[in-house]
Image (cartoon, rainbow, N blue to C red):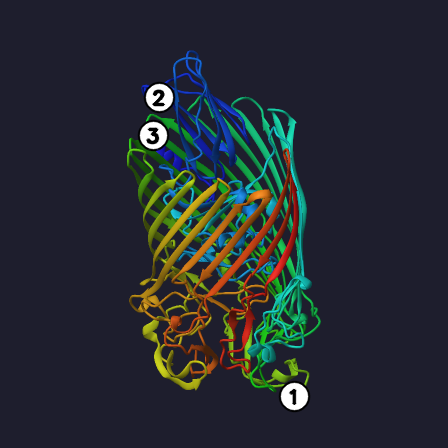
Amino acid sequence: MGLVCAALALAVPSSAQVYTGRIDVTVADTTGAVLPGVTVDIAGPQNKTAATDNKGEAHFLNLPPGTYTVAAKLSGFGDYTNKNVPVTAGTSVPLKIALGVGGVATQVDVSAASPTIDPKKTATSTNVTYDELQKVPSSRDPWVVLQTVPGVIVDRVNVGGAESGQQSNYQAKGASGGDNTWNIDGVAITDMSALGSSPTYYDFDMFQEMQVTTGGADVNSATPGVALNFVLKGGSNTPHGSTRFYFENQSLQSNNMPADLKASIGGKSGKGNRMDEYKDYGFELGGPILKDHLWAWGSVGRTDVTVLTLTSTPDATFLKNYAFKGVGQVTRDLRGSFTFFEGIKNKFGRSAGPQRPPETTWDQGGPTKLYKGEVNYVVGNNLFLTGRFAHVVGGFFLTPEGGLDKNMVYSDDDGIGRFSWYEYKTNRPQDNVSLDANIFKGSHELKFGFGYRAADVDSSYTVPGNAIITYYDGYPNMIAEVTAWNHFTGTSAKYTSGFIADTISKDRLTANIGVRWDHQASSVLPYSQKGNSILPTLLPDLTGKAAEDVVVWNSIAPRLGLSYALGEDRKSILRASYSRFASQLNAGQGSFFSTVGSFRGVYFYGVTDTNGNKTVDAAEIAGMEVGNWYGFDIDNPANVGTPNHKVGDYQTPMTDELVFGADHELMPNFGVSGNVTWRKFTHFNWRPVQGLRSDDYVQLGTFAGSDAPVGSYSKPYYGVTAATMPANRTATEYIDREGYSQRYLGLELSATKRLANRWMARFGFSTNDHREYFDGVNSRTDPTSSTANPNIDGGQVLRATGGSGKSGIYMLLPKYQFILTGLYQGPWGINFGANMLNRQGYAMPYFRDRVATGDPLGNLKTVLLVKDVPDFRLPSVTSLDVRLEKEFAFNRYRFNVDLDIFNLTNSATVLGRQYNLRLGTANTVQEIMNPRILRLGVRFNF
């Protein structure tokens, strides 16, 4: 108990992940008697030597993924050599060695010891190996790899790299995308301001392996989201390297615009959204500086992606990446490494699309840098220590192509922006320190860890022109949003946590028992905001105060996993686990408590464009009555003494998970598995208007009509009354959303065939059911059904996502998703690869916005017109990519010529429509799949 308390008093980064593997060796003679003192050597990406203890065991931890040779020697016994022991990230290879008496060497092939059949495995995870990353056709970014993992749902379809210039949104098993985590070589790098996002982009050829975890009892996983861990390549005693060049352009592309859409959305080109040009090139090189003591590796890569939207607006992205890793073996027991990574993104025309013409798009820039140090130390045979430090320099800027001197139209009568857009700048540095330990004692393996993470965010939004945002309301009628000219936020977050776990092995039974504690806190920094001279009284210049620990989340999360091996050969394993997870806190969560307020603005309705310049001017709102406002107390707009909002009673958002599963090795190198996952999500935090709950709302009327394709509808809408109207309508309270919960139930099946006997494959299937529940008046406020809150008790959870130039994407977890990746190595060096995805389409939640309801809290509302969110779905998506490869081999050297075909069937599946039936563009197609395209590639490696 004292050790548990000591470990929990310390801290570990909340998203640390295991990026190495291990080999657990047990040596016995031919009678089964264990042999202590046996010298065991491993050679491969890393070389190590150990002697077996009195139980005949030797453990090799922190091994980079790859294939190892294991040798065992003991005087008076035959030598043992095994040249094919595969290791993957986050897995252990249990290797049993039997030494015979005498001098005859023993050669054993244990390549069938699949990492998927691992009795110590506690996580629901998928390892995507180097062979699959390189030999299966893909768009060469992490998000397309994620969609091949059972249970992971990605919001967009990336044909031939067309979406690689912008991040995808994704989720798994009901967890919010904000709970996703990103890690490089075990260090958390998740953007804590845009939760769940990566802070950078990557050179695909710098990865040795990718590990994706979606649940399970591993105490290293803090959140219920998808944990993605990149394993970088590194140097070894054997020099190695590679270079590549991939190319696509319009001459290698088909046209998939259907005839029925060509007239309406094809424009002058008669084509859909498509690739203009794609190039991906670079090299990586590694090897020994001083054999057996010092190694180095580095890479340089560049990816250029230019796409054209339905309106032929270009969106050009240029990604540059540099990486370096140095590793030194100081003594037999002490090893150190240093890693540097820099990702630079320059983008011109970000967010280009049917609703964002060129002048409203952004030009983006800004590098992200990672500095990481690691030390591994072995004490005796049974204590393994790992310490890490990392510093991330993050941030970027978005500058509108229309400039900051023009006024801005957010939406005309067709939902299209005009003239310019706002500017955004942000800095997001992070620091991360950790120490982990593994201790072996009898049948127990104890691990614990501690550390600290800090993430600061300072961001500014600048509204162009006169800082009046215009919305058309049947031009020349308009709505004016007068804002502060500059919105600035500054926050600081601290993350500390600790874990301890014990793995107990008793014959066929393995038990994993653990617990972790997390402490997360978001604070507000002092900062100033420039107001608006058009409304100097309502929107003055303000300077706010700092506020420490505005939101603090504390959690204790127990973990329990059990596995039992069946059969004489123990090739089948039954598993069960219970886990509790805490969500991760946004670094800017406490920004609402600033005495300035993050955003301030005033609305004027019924404005007329009297001078015909298509935007609202100051003179056109002069003398008008304020219609609505946000971000400040209108009775005291210059108040900076006390926050406009308050913090009430809240708890840490939690997820409880049960997993029941089984693994089975069908044949050497071929394993299958299945899992049933149940989850319940509770203690959601929210910020309703102070004192308002659902019983304060009454039905004010019914919005009825008939619109294609919904047909007739009659939807009630609600609002407050004079008696329940709060004195300060903009004052909110941060509290627990009492009575609101979500439930997830899903099945996932997978089969993995490692590369052997000239072929490999990975198959996955998942089915999902994700629902939300409202219990009591405190579980919601306004009962009006909208896209943001369908407000259907027991209904399916709807999540809206977006991205650069994307149509509105409403993710409703599909009832089915199939994935298949594979490779066949044919004769004469001719190889065939394939990558297939099939899933149910996402929701089409038709709605109308700006519905006048008479609610004094907010007259104009968005009303969901469908009866239930699954009533209308987009067509199912099928994407098939294939590769034909010719390999020329010369000793250790390999030269490959690749022909990849993406969207082989030239599908034109509709991926998005205009769901706002108020607009003139209602129900029009906004996006289809990119057409079939050929990618030419050459690769050289040794």
Image height of 635 relative to 507, above or below:
below
746 left or right, relative to 821:
left
Position of the C terminus, as image quadrant, is top right
Q: Count neighbours of disc 3 (C-alpha within 10 A) and say few if under 14, some if 14 to 19, many if 20 or more.
A: some
Element under label 2? Answer: loop
The foreground one among 550 and 311 is 311
**Is 555 positioned to the left or the right of 493 in the image?**
left
Rendered residue at 58%/60% (across/down): 163
Q: 722 and 802: which one is in front?
A: 802
Vertical placement of 126 versus 836: above or below?
above
Number of residues whose C-alpha sits closer than 10 Å to that of mark 2, classed few (under 14), some (14–19) or many (20 or more): some
Where does the N terminus fall, quadrant-wise?
A: top left
Q: Residue 279 is drawn in which quadrant?
A: bottom right
Type of amino acid under label 1: Thr
Residue type for callout 3: His
Amino acid at circle 2: Lys
How far apart are labels 3 and 2 at the CA level? Answer: 12 Å
- Residue tagged by mark 1? 610
Rendered location of residue 198, percent (x, y): 55, 52
Tag 1 or tag 3, which sits nearer the N-term?
3
